[in-house]
Amino acid sequence: MSHYPDLAFVDIETTGSNFERDRITEIGIKTLAQDEVTVWESLINPETFIPLNIQRLTGISPSMVAGQPSFDKLAQQIKQELEGKIFVAHNARFDHGFIKASFKRLGIDFRPKVLCTVKLSRLLFPAQPRHNLDTIINAHNLTVSARHRALGDADVLLQFWRVCEQTFGHERLLQVVNQLIGNASLPPHIDQNMIDVIPDSPGCYIMYGENRAPLYIGKSIALRTRVMGHFQAALTQRKEMKLSMQVREIDWIETSGELGALILESKLIKERMPSMNVKLRRSKDLCGWRLEHDPAGVLRPALVSHKELTPGLQEDLYGLFYSKREANSYLTAVSKKYQLCAALLGLEKVEEGKSCFAYHVKQCGGACIGQTSLELHNLQVQTALNFYKVQAWPYPGVIAIKEGDEMIVINNWCYLGTAINEDELYELADIRDAEFDLDIYKLLKKALVGSFKHQVIKLGRATQALDD
């Protein structure tokens, strides 16, 4: 029977949640090695202020840590306790991230194999609605000696491990650990250094295969976490496995937020055509419907081709489509949904005075043979298509959407670029030949009625907005 590797169940208390700014105030480690448990714990002088809310949560006050050693005095002891063991923690990115950053400030490289008990709980107890520590304590009737103290919480993790072992058995648990600790999750041509330099901030990532051929482009508000997610999923998903086997290099472009990342992703996929993305279509053959009265007074949809199309400037445009075929399919679906006459919509040819096919199957109100008045039919057509009306550009000119330190410059739903200072802002605002892109239109339309509607700078006031 295979033995478990040595496990160090770790919990820390800190002055806050930022790896770089905040500091550790306590570490508790319970080591399970060859069925024996050893304990190491210490309060740590963070040499910085402990906020009152943190003091209330942990019970650790400045007076308690004042006479305690700082992390640098304990670093070698801590390293010895953790070396060669699997680092087990709840939300392990937090505890591991803090300890790794603390070692890094001393010039010590700390890279253990990490097992997150949140992920372990999700995998083994998928029916459980939540996987925070309090839920796990209640779900498995664990004994809590000191909640929100390092050794107390580390002891809870050891108890949870015992529950997993009793419930699923030694071999199954070992298999799950090997799946989760990530030692097999990095692709053969990607090393940890390549991953470590990717920031965990918003932006787009580009994965390349041999000869820098683009394989896949994605976006995330946490780039490194998302990239690692691909490789962890490669253990169970065929597409991710294929990507992992082919990837040779990873690049990224940071943005100030999610909207910038979404727009950049749409542009990059169209420009670079990565082999494993769903192909996004360019907008060069776009068309839409316009309603026009024919000589008999029937309101008929007329197709507006790409040459005549100026989305954002046309008030009477309905639906935008990548092809004439797509436009006709959409109109057919609308006629069925709202029981409109396919003949009067121009979708079906009938002899004058004869009913359309839909009338025979009770899918048309009979406007084709005068059973419904023309006025009512026209009103129904207008009402149905209004749900799909292309919104005219609601601003008098160019705007910028402020997101973090960046300004996304837009005119008539066209993306002009992203500015980081006033000179760039006005340079982009002068662009006159930007191409309308349907995917970006949809992103912007959603953003401008949502959380970004109060982040709009009308460029007449851009200088003032930049100075704020």
Image: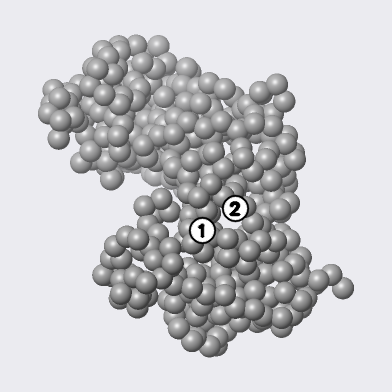
Q: Is residue 109 left or right of residue 378?
A: right
Examine the rendered structure and indicate whether residue 86 appears above or below residue 137: above
**What label sits on residue 110 in the rendered view?**
2
Q: Amino acid at mark 1?
A: Ile
Closer to the camera in the image, 395 or 341: 395
Q: Which residue is mark 1?
A: 99
Closer to the camera in the image, 426 or 450: 426
Callout 1 touching callout 2 (CB < 8 Å): yes
Q: Farthest residue to the right: give it.
A: 1
Q: Residue at x 45, y 83 (%)?
A: 146
Closer to the camera in the image, 433 or 224: 224
Measured as percent of width and height from the top left, residue 229 is found at 59, 49
Q: Amino acid at mark 2?
A: Phe
- Distance of label 1 from label 2 (alpha carbons): 8 Å
Q: Work out whether residue 330 can be spotted.
A: no
Measured as percent of width and height from the top left, residue 373 is found at 28, 38
Mark nearer the N terminus (1 vs 2): 1
Measured as percent of width and height from the top left, residue 42 is found at 48, 73
**What label sits on residue 188 in the rendered view?**
none
Local packing at callout 2 (Cα closer than 10 Å; few below 14, some 14-19, many 20+) is some
